[in-house]
Amino acid sequence: MGGRRVSNQRRDIGTEEVLYRVGLVAALVAATGFLVYSLGPQEQRDFLHRYSFCVIYRFTGFYCPGCGGSRAVSELLRGNLLASLLYHPLAAYGLVLYIAFMGSHMAAHVTAWLRSRTGTGAGDGPRLRGLRWRTSFITAAVVLLIGNFVIKNVIHLVTGVDILARLDQIFLP
């Protein structure tokens, strides 16, 4: 018969493309969160910044690997990169990695779209590619997470100083 053959095969889009699409959704969620955070009352922002929701810290007095993460994100939203790094370096690392990954993939998508619109072919010069995903990105994140956990708890054990409370004294008005 002369009918059209329909393929049921799905197009394999690859890890980078999946991460790029998830990153676009994450940008939308982050923008919404930023608006809610910045338009909310100052008292609510200060409460969220100072109050620890960590169950491990509340019961043991020791920091969990994620302790300081919310404050770090809050400081990033305020534009204070140094405070964010001190509260929890993983937040700033994640932001830098996100910007590099998403920026490079956005540039690759835009140039591919421009090529398709202008009719230039694949042989008309090098094709721009986005940042390739590496497992070393996760390894670096785990090192930051464990390092933050160990350093803060060692300081707490040796000196008895509550690092996050001390940072709050320095960075909060």
Image: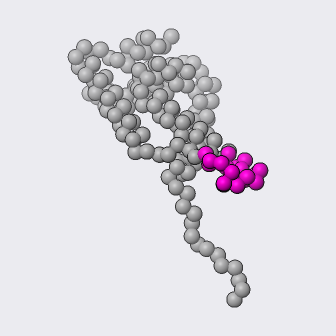
The correct choice, above or below, for 162 with respect to 52 in the image is above
Q: Residue 38, image x and y in percent?
A: 61, 24
In the rendered structure, does residue 16 fall within the stretch colored magenta?
no
* Total numbered labels: 0
In the rendered structure, does residue 115 fall within the stretch colored magenta?
yes
Query: Relative to residue 34, is residue 75 drawn left or right?
Result: left
Q: Residue at x 55, y 57 (%)?
A: 13
Q: Is residue 122 visible?
A: yes
Camera-side residue: 46 or 144? 144
Q: Residue 119, image x and y in percent?
A: 76, 54
Per the rendered image, the range of residues in magenta is 111-128
Which residue extends farthest bottom? 1
Q: Residue 66, image x and y in percent?
A: 37, 32
Q: Residue at x 48, y 13 (%)?
A: 172
The correct choice, above or below, for 100 with respect to 72 in the image is below
Q: Residue at x 25, y 22 (%)?
A: 154
